[in-house]
Image (cartoon, helix red, strand yellow):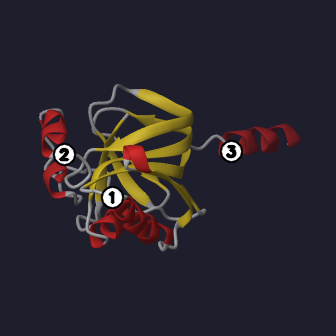
Amino acid sequence: MKKYILIILLFAGVSATAQIKSATLVASGLTCSMCSKAIYKALEALPMIQTVAVDIEKSSYTMTFKDGVVSPDEIRNAVEKAGFFVASLQLQGTFNGSKVGKDTHIDISGSTYHFVAVADQTLNGEKTITLIDKNYLPQKARKKYSHKTSMKCFETGYMASCCPSFSNTAKRIYHVTL
């Protein structure tokens, strides 16, 4: 009996998990160090952010997150309220057995991510995913992904009938690639 309980516990612990730990954001529209400081203060004020480090030369911000929900939209909104734009947003996370592939949907840190232009694989360890939604990449960079999926949610950013494993069509979905 003890053998069976041990085997059940081993298999129960092999579930796929993922958690976003940090992010690197590149902002556009900056002209001076005061611009950089405005974005820094806006990001630092977000409750999900633990730390923010700035690279003024690259207009980039590296953030670490508190445990819990990570919302790319809140990050983007903070940057836009400061008067600037997101040129790119990459999320760094720890993955444990997360199976991804073309048009795979997975939940990470409270948000749903739809993988585009990704070969079938299992993610383990530290990985970086890049947001490819509108307002997270310049139009030209985003356009190269538009033909890699035929799902309507890529254009709207919200789950639709093309997302068969989810029933809530009003839920925000983020499109990412590796």
| Label 2 element class | loop
Q: Identify which amino acid the numbered label 1 is placed on.
A: Cys
Q: Which residue is mark 1?
A: 32
Res 71 → quadrant: bottom left
For residue 42, side relative to residue 151 (left or right): right
102 and 22: which is toward the camera:
22
Of badges 1 and 2, nearer the viewer stands 1
**Residue 64, percent across and down?**
56, 55
79 and 153: which is toward the camera:
79
Of badges 3 and 2, nearer the viewer stands 2
| Label 1 element class | loop
Contact check, label 1 and label 3, Cβ < 8 Å: no
Inter-mark Cα distance, 1 to 3: 50 Å
Q: Which residue is mark 2?
A: 138
Inter-mark Cα distance, 3 to 2: 41 Å
| Label 3 element class | loop
Of badges 1 and 3, nearer the viewer stands 1
Q: Earlier in the sequence, mark 3 or mark 2?
A: 3
Q: Is residue 127 above or below residue 74?
A: above
What residue is drawn where x is 33% and y is 58%?
32
What residue is drawn where x is 60% and y is 62%?
67
Q: Which residue is mark 3?
A: 13
Crowd class of label 1 (few under 14; some 14 to 19; many from 20; radius 10 Å): few
Contact check, label 1 and label 2, Cβ < 8 Å: no
Q: Identify which amino acid the numbered label 3 is placed on.
A: Gly
Crowd class of label 3 (few under 14; some 14 to 19; many from 20; radius 10 Å): few
Q: Is residue 125 above or below residue 170?
A: above
Q: Earlier in the sequence, mark 1 or mark 2?
A: 1
What residue is drawn where x is 26% and y is 51%?
136
